Image (cartoon, rainbow, N blue to C red):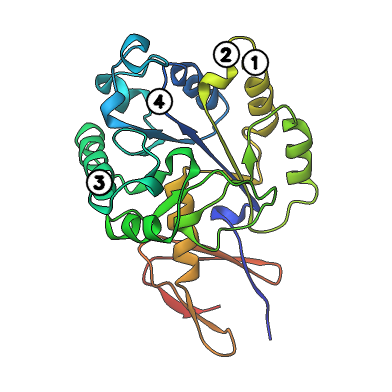
Amino acid sequence: MKSVVFTWPDGKQGALTTSWDDGTIHDRRLVSILNRYGIKGTWNLCSSLLGQDKNQTGWMDIVNAEEVSQLYAGHEVACHTVHHMDLTYIAEDVIRSELITDRQRLEGIVKAPVKGLAYPFGSVDKRVRDIVQNCGIVYARGVNETHAFQHPEDFLDWSPTCHFDNNYRELWEGFLNPLWDGKLLFLMGHSFEFEPDHWDHIEDFCKLAGNHPQVWYATNMEMYEYISAWRMMSFSIDLSIAKNNSCREVWLRIENSLERIRPGEVREI
């Protein structure tokens, strides 16, 4: 029987996604760095904080709602709740309001569905997870680090590979060596952490990691959609026929042959 192996779009073996919380004005500089090296990010925003300065937040200046669409163009905007509240400590109706209102406000800004989430403080339990799912969120990121390069078992409790830190060179070397089909590096962080004198770290990482010919760069949502499409694939018992049940193309490696299965397509492989 032939082997049928998951691979990223265009047969790329590895994938890199990043996730950045809170929407502080330092995102402006970070977005420009990621763009320079072809790396994508998901930006998790609290709609009630947009446009507020540190005198209002008691913390830091936040990007303006008017700049969100242009600033994060080519990336993804996701929820971080309205008020950045620990969802495990509040009533169920308040959780729903925090999630649905944040979704609605952000969708009004970016003119697209917003169905991703980063849990504030990384806090989640079964009650919160169930409500998140019922509010139409399809993936939600926590903060527990896996230090691994695997796909998530549960997209509503999605743990990153790690928080961005000074060991980025070792991390990237570990990701590349060896680089096998389906390998996923998921970095999270906050743009303000590079202030005032650590911007060279993220710039150096992006030089290392960007524009690699065997790496697919995608947002958290794009990762969710592609992996979900792959998991929905149907195969005959002898793996000679494949059906793509999703609305996006899926790539697979059969022995040494690379195959692309288009949306809805059923064919021999």
SS at mark 2?
loop
Question: Which residue is the site of mark 3?
Answer: 94
Secondary structure at badge 3 equals: helix
Above or below, 145 relative to 254: above
Residue 195 numbered tag: 2
Query: Disc 2 residue type?
Result: Glu
* Mark pair 1, 2: CA separation: 6 Å
Residue 114 relative to residue 2: left or right = left
Mark 2 or 3, closer to the camera: 3
User: For this view, does 152 lie left or right of residue 228?
Assistant: right
Q: Nearer the viewer, mark 4 or mark 3?
A: 3
Could you say whether the residue bearing mark 1 is in a helix, strand or loop?
loop
Q: What whole-number distance in Å separates the C-alpha atoms at marks 2 and 3?
A: 34 Å
Q: In the rendered structure, which amino acid carries the disc numbered 4?
A: Gly
Q: Residues within 10 Å of mark 4 (few under 14, many from 20)?
A: many
What is the distance, in whole Å, between disc 1 and disc 3 at their CAs? 37 Å
Dot placed on the residue nearer the N-terminal end, 4 or 3: 4
